[in-house]
Amino acid sequence: MTVRIGLIGAGGMGRAHVERIEKELAGGKVVAVADLNVEGAEAVAGPLGAKAYASGPELIADPDVDAVLIATFGKVHAPDVIAAVKAGKYVLCEKPLATTTEDCIAIMEAEAAAGKKLVTVGFMRRFDAGYQEMAALRQSGELGYATLVHCRHRNPSVPENYTTRNMIDDTAIHEIDICRYLLGEEIASVRIDVPRATSRRFEHLQDPLVLVAKTASGVLIDDEVNVNIQFGYSIECELVMEAGTIRLGDQEHTHVRDGHGDRNAVCRSHIDRFHAAFNAEVQQWIRAVERDEHTGSDAWDGYAATAVVDAALQSLDRGGQEVSVDLIERPALYER
């Protein structure tokens, strides 16, 4: 079976997904592309022999589309996700699932009405081999339980339209989700600390920020978000356990030793660093759709991450005050 995929969003991330589905993965084919900029949709769809649509609902209604991949801006995700669920089609939605908890709850309600989980949220770090090894070692109990998590999310630079709030709802959301994944528990409270700002930023941007969170069991998480570090894209994570530490491996491509000393190549973007994880995520999703099964993170994971983001944004607005993360009772569909 070939899974016929409809792509909503013909921007950079959407095009990257087309590239991997058509050239690197098996079992899937992009048969339709939708974008509000219909010329953009046509530019992506044309070389594939795919249909082009001007809206998500048109694409979702196409009977030749088996499953939907959403790669648009987060604030417009919810209507298309809900429409796909109501149409009974599996969805892989790039993070965030939605930008409000209300929209996330509406998505979960749509799944409850459908009677099955259809939504996978694109938290690709869960498919990274390093993070998977960290989670497995933590779960083994060999080093006791976790007490602290140290995270670093560093970008070389960001565009001028990137905002301080994006440092939380677009960037730190990755650490929020991966810490939930690594620790197997919810985040209970969060605050935002504001250090001295770098001079290598746009004036409207407060950079860096530090997100500090506590889980339900008391594990303390600190996440440095530093998006104008200049040298490259660098992701770090360390679990501090009772009897040792577990650190995410370095991501150098090559290591050179010569008369100038030791040096290694550094990733330039998330596409570079997490290429294999993106491929594993989408490949697993395609195979799951073939079997009529859900895979990966679900709508509850998307909701929980958005709830933490909401609390962190409140803390930012309140000058760093610690804010509780209020979650609804987990619906039965998402019990594990």
Image (cartoon, rainbow, N blue to C red):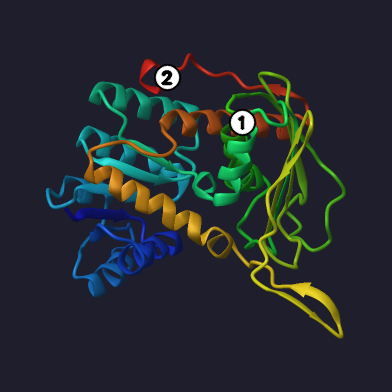
Q: Residue at x 26, y 57 (%)?
A: 28
Residue 140 has which mark?
Answer: 1
Query: Pointer 2: what residue?
Result: 335
Q: Relative to 228, is 16 on the left or the right?
A: left
Q: Position of residue 43 (x, y in %)?
A: 30, 72
- Local crowd at mark 2 within 10 Å, few (<14), some, or many (≥20)? few
Q: CA distance from mark 1 to mark 2?
A: 22 Å
- Name which residue type carries label 1: Ser
Q: Position of residue 240 (x, y in %)?
A: 77, 35
Mark 2 element type: loop
Q: Residue at x 56, y 43 (%)?
A: 132
Above or below: residue 251 compared with residue 148: below
Q: Residue at x 60, y 30 (%)?
A: 139
* Of the pair 103 and 178, the residue shown nearer to us: 178
Above or below: residue 289 compared with residue 115: below
Q: Position of residue 220 (x, y in %)?
A: 75, 29
